[in-house]
Amino acid sequence: MHGREGDYWWADRLGPAWEVLRRCSELTMGRRAVITAFDGGAPQVSPDEITRGWRQDAETVVTNVINSYDEIILAISDEYAEVWLYSEGAAVPSLATWEHLAGELNTITLTQPELEYPMPPKSWDAEVVLANREWLEEVQARLRDGLGAYRPLTFLRDDLIVTRDAPAIAALERYLAELSRCHCPTRGDAAWVLPNEPQFVRPYDLLERGAGRALFRCRTCGAFWAIEGASALGDGVAQRLSAATAWESADLVSARRQLLLRTETEGDQPCRHQGCLRRALRGRELCVDHAYGLI
């Protein structure tokens, strides 16, 4: 989705930050970047980068004016990096104390929580959805506070971009138009057609997969498809389903697990359930599957 937030334009589910910057050079050319929230700690600024005016401020990397995509790609290769872009002459604030918006969780959006997490069919637990709404409200509040305090031209991380930079908005709208082409099967016996895009930018959500069957939802038109004999993405025979049939036909274990892992975090200790090889949830003795009875 995309929309407006004050004087900012935003869009979500665009794929990894490095791919967006590669496709939309207007975002970074002639800008300075403050890069924060590295999962494994900020990378060391190289002597060459120091010569070019880069510096490291605690866990934050501050660049000089960016003249090419290659200058910034390594600095944003961390999947949790958050990028704040400023014009060449603007004062760059200290973001050394900025924390992850969502820690180890990737998907962040400015979509209204009740739209992002609608009340589920009876096969889902409503309390899980309510917990995710609360989590998203907290994340959105922190992002809005950050935008108000630091006033970047652009804020970018995997799957989310927020900008008030007019050339960047025009480039992103063109990019969105490319991503919005519908790739649903056109006939009942047609295989799923994947676009010529990086593997990370998917035109569908995989809701369930197993026992030779996969359930997908098109991100463009919202149609549900069951693909029988799906040994790999794109294989098999496609059948379009109504929303009610789709939700009823899937046990949605994988979808529920995904929701739970937005509010729970896996720790470093193994699950105590006999024979289980998964990691236990942080502060618990069991993995998400055994803690919530998913298996």
Image (spheres, helix red, strand yellow):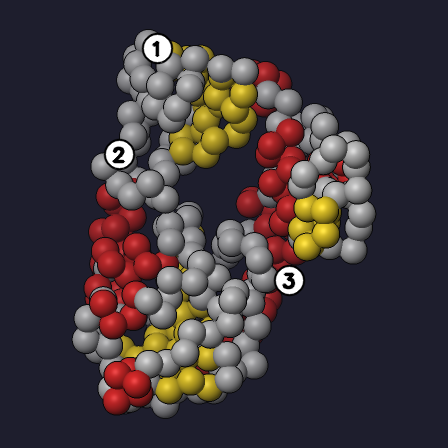
Residue lying furthest top: 189
| CA distance for labels 2 and 1 | 19 Å
Which residue appears at 41% of the width and 48% of the height? 13
- Above or below, comparing residue 110 to residue 49 in the picture: above
- Is residue 243 among what the camera can see? no
Crowdedness near tag 3: few (<14), some (14–19) or many (≥20) residues, C-alpha within 10 Å:
few
What kind of residue is marked 2? Pro
Count the labels in the image.
3
Crowdedness near tag 2: few (<14), some (14–19) or many (≥20) residues, C-alpha within 10 Å:
some
Residue at the disc numbered 3? 138
In the displayed structure image, the side of residue 155 where residue 276 appears, left or right: right
What kind of residue is marked 3? Glu
Element type at mark 3:
helix
Question: In the depicted view, which residue is nearer to us: 175 or 65?
Answer: 65
What kind of residue is marked 1? Gly
Residue lying furthest left: 67
In the displayed structure image, the side of residue 158 where residue 267 appears, left or right: right
Whichever of labels 2 and 1 marks the residue nearer the N terminus, that label is: 1
Which residue appears at 24% of the width and 59% of the height? 22
The percent position of residue 34, horizontal first and vertical second, equals 40, 78
Q: Are marks 2 and 3 in contact (CB under 8 Å)?
A: no
Q: Nearer the viewer, mark 2 or mark 1?
A: 2
Residue at the disc numbered 1? 188
Element type at mark 2:
loop
Residue at the disc numbered 2? 195
The percent position of residue 134, horizontal first and vertical second, equals 68, 54
